[in-house]
């Protein structure tokens, strides 16, 4: 079993910054791609950014130039640096990881989510 635990969410004024972290633990052989998703009230969950095990990144258009995804493979940790935050960035942010376990099963895992609220 693999657990993903997010942290770093909170309340911030528009124009401010937050840094989200997601630590993976458990029966991990290899973490493949990882990503951040978000879900605002009444809306579908959407991709924010993802990153391969080799470090190649992809950022969704609404956050490009403001958010940066990164990872520390040695620490099994994923980050999302969020700058120039806007009220429309308000959502629950979820960490996602494609993990190969020590039993060589490859499964998709989700964290419990962390709330980000941006006030105008």
Image: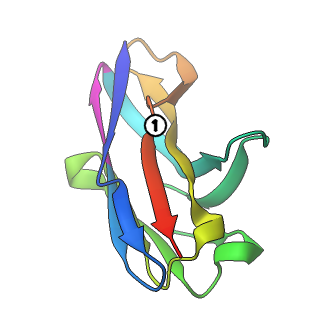
When the figure is inspected, residue 66 is found, relative to residue 109, above or below; the finding is: below
- The x and y percentages for residue 105 are 52, 15
- The x and y percentages for residue 27 are 30, 18
Hey, which residue is sitting farthest front in the picture? 120
Near-viewer residue (41 or 68) = 41
* Residue found at x 55% / y 57%: 52
For the N terminus, give its image quadrant: top left
User: Looking at the image, can residue 71 be seen?
Assistant: no
User: Looking at the image, can residue 116 be seen?
Assistant: yes
- The x and y percentages for residue 50 are 59, 58
Instruction: Using residue 77 as the reference point, say whether residue 35 is left or right of it.
Output: right
Hey, which residue is sitting farthest left in the picture? 75
* Residue found at x 39% / y 81%: 16
When the figure is inspected, residue 25 is found, relative to residue 87, above or below; the finding is: above
Which element type, helix, strand or loop, lies under badge 1?
Answer: loop
Instruction: Using residue 36 as the reference point, say whether residue 80 is left or right of it.
Output: left
Question: Residue 59: within the magenta?
Answer: no
Near-viewer residue (70 or 18) = 18
Near-viewer residue (24 or 42) = 42
* Residue found at x 33% / y 66%: 19
Question: Residue 23: within the magenta?
Answer: yes
Q: Which residues are drawn in magenta?
A: 22-27
When the figure is inspected, residue 25 is found, relative to residue 1, above or below; the finding is: below
Quadrant of residue 41 within the rendered picture: top right
* Residue found at x 33% / y 26%: 28
Instruction: Using residue 87 as the reference point, say whether residue 25 is left or right of it.
Output: left
When the figure is inspected, residue 33 is found, relative to residue 63, above or below; the finding is: above
Identify the coloring.
rainbow
**Mainly helix, strand or loop, the magenta region?**
strand
Q: Name the residue tied to disc 1.
A: 113
């Amino acid at each position: 079993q693999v657990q993903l635990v997010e942290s770093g969410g909170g309340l911030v004024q528009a124009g401010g910054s937050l840094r989200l972290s997601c630590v993976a633990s458990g029966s991990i052989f290899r973490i493949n791609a990882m990503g951040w998703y978000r879900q605002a009230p009444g809306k579908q969950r959407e991709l924010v950014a993802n990153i391969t095990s080799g470090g190649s990144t992809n950022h969704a258009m609404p956050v490009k130039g403001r958010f940066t995804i990164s990872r520390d493979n040695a620490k099994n940790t994923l980050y999302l640096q969020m700058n120039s935050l806007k009220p429309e960035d308000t959502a629950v942010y979820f960490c996602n990881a494609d993990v190969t376990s020590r039993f060589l099963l490859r499964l998709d895992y989700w964290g419990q989510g962390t709330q980000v609220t941006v006030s105008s």
